[in-house]
Image: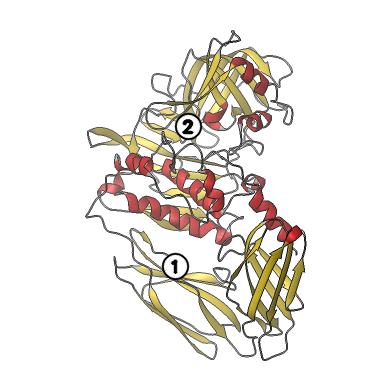
Amino acid sequence: MPGAVLLGVWLLAAPSSPFASSRVDDEALARASVAAVRGRVLGINSAWDGAVGAIYTQVSIAVDQSWGLAATPALVDVKLLGGTVGDVALVIGGQARFSVGEQVHVFLDVRPRDRSVSVTGMGRGKWTMADARSSSGVGRREAHGSGSGIVRDALSVANLDRLAALAGGRVDAAGARLRLPAMAVGHTAAVPHTASAIAARWHEADSGAAVPVDSAFGGHPLFPRGGLTQFLRGLAAWSAAGSLQLTAGVERGPRCFGNNEFPDGRISVSYDDPCGEIADTSPVLAIGGAYYSSSDVRDIGGEPYWKITKGMVVMDNALPKFAGMSTGCYEELLTHELGHAIGLGHASSSPAVMAPSLSPACVHRTESLPLQAPDLSALAAPYPPSTTSPGWPATPAGMTAQVTGHSVTLRWVASAGASPSAYQLQAGSVPGGTDHGSVVVNVPSFTAPQVATGVYYVRVVAVNANGASASTADLVVVVGTGLPGVPTALVAAGGPGGSVRMHWAPPAGAALTGYMLLAGYAPGDIAARITLGVPALVANHVASGTYYVRVAAMNAQGMGPVSPEIAVVVP
């Protein structure tokens, strides 16, 4: 069964406890590192990097011991994304943080953009040492957010030595820049460089204005419709829980962490690491953060909050890192990173979307873990719920299509709820698809003349200033004559050894040229398209899992409507 092995590998490769920004254990993290060093922090300085217009922090470490390097250097400069310069801070969720004088053990990877070294796995690759020269010494690692750190892990010096010995085995440090030119004086260590002591929020929550969230063109390449469903659900989750409203913005080119558009007033989601910030070997999947400004400090619940002026989420470009990630895990990852973009740090307990690790059960879900008590508590401080803030519109209803020749008129009605200001029509050649494009209209109807012969799957989304509704179910619109009908009586069964048997009844009518079998990991998903010449399929060695399949008939005029979907369980 073409595509079946791929489906199974994708489903079975999921780890048991992935981190929200990195998803490997400590041994794998060590193997992904080019080097490890142990020593004392001599200095910390944050400044603007003129090459990209973003704030970075340079941490200088006097090295006592190293692994993975040809010789132990006297000094290593670690360059971290984020920091504070004057009245502006760039805060990256889960970033490692340092203080002058502390003894540290750090795993290092190489930033693709400029070959500087950073901490592997962000905060996960940095340990604070106690009695590092003693065999009974201990290294401690923190998971931290906008408040005080919380100790998560402790390892003995001996165990850290064992892990450090793995660094450089698979990835070497050739070409890495261990020393960097002195950065312009920006900010010293009086305040933690990640600005974790600074609370910030989007002040738009006070006026009810929504913060637009833009997505790079095409979305994520591994998820149905570019992960648009997961994107919209992530926005809706945060919008429903507090006074801050996030709304879908526009599709645009990829953006990085530069602040050249300051003040921007938007959140952007980019894919394929256009910033060259994440090493391919790094366990980091995504980076989320925001720019803070002290130009507008407001008191909320007795606490001062800086103004967030711009938020960013960047996904990595190494697609194998996402292997095994269900739509539920992806949605949880995206929602987590959006949490960083609205000013939230890591939660101190689980289960929580903002916990340092994804919930292991996400691999069995098609949707994210809902926001939990720790998430809601953290959100309520900067964004207390408002009973007067407007909501987003409900899903439209009663969608109909009238086809006259090659002219198609669509009509629908708005459901009860907040009034929509516009509607977005989406059309595709397969259920849930958008390959035929989308159009925004201001009234609940639309007429398209001269539509080509074919089968179209159409849905509508209502939008207003506060957000977007869920889309309607697909309406099947058939234009032109001579297309085949819907196959019927689709049945399938999985058997021993990964065997799969499927068959269906051909539609009555015109002669057929073949069939298109659509298969996915979740209802409505399309991960594989398989062309067949007969109304049956036999496959062996299909990996265990549940697959969702439907079939359409084809003739010389094109592909007809798809059959109802069924699930196939392969034991």
Q: Earlier in the sequence, mark 1 or mark 2?
A: 2
In the picture provided, is 93 more to the left or to the right than 28? Answer: left
Residue at the far top: name it: 134
The front one of 6 and 450 is 6
Identify the disc placed on residue 82: 2
Asked where in the image residue 219 lies, by quadrant, the reply is bottom right
Amino acid bearing label 1: Ser
Q: Residue at x 46, y 21 (%)?
A: 185
Disc 1 crowd, CA 10 A, few/some/many (<14, 14-19, 20+): many
Q: Residue at x 65, y 74 (%)?
A: 491
- The location of residue 478, given as percent across then percent down, is 56, 84
Asked where in the image residue 299 lies, by quadrant, the reply is top left
Residue picked out by circle 1 = 471
Disc 2 crowd, CA 10 A, few/some/many (<14, 14-19, 20+): many
Disc 2 on helix, strand or loop?
loop
Alpha-carbon distance for marks 1 and 2?
A: 37 Å
Above or below — where is 329 with respect to 112?
below
Above or below — where is 160 with respect to 533?
above
Amino acid bearing label 2: Gly
Asked where in the image residue 125 lies, by quadrant, the reply is top right
- The location of residue 28, given as percent across then percent down, is 66, 33
Asked if disc 1 and disc 2 are in contact, CB closer than 8 Å, the reply is no
Whether residue 290 is visible, yes or no, is yes
Task: Describe the colour scheme in one phrase.
Answer: secondary structure
User: Quadrant location of the C terminus?
Assistant: bottom right
The front one of 302 and 307 is 302
In the picture provided, is 8 more to the left or to the right than 259? Answer: right
Q: Residue at x 71, y 20 (%)?
A: 69
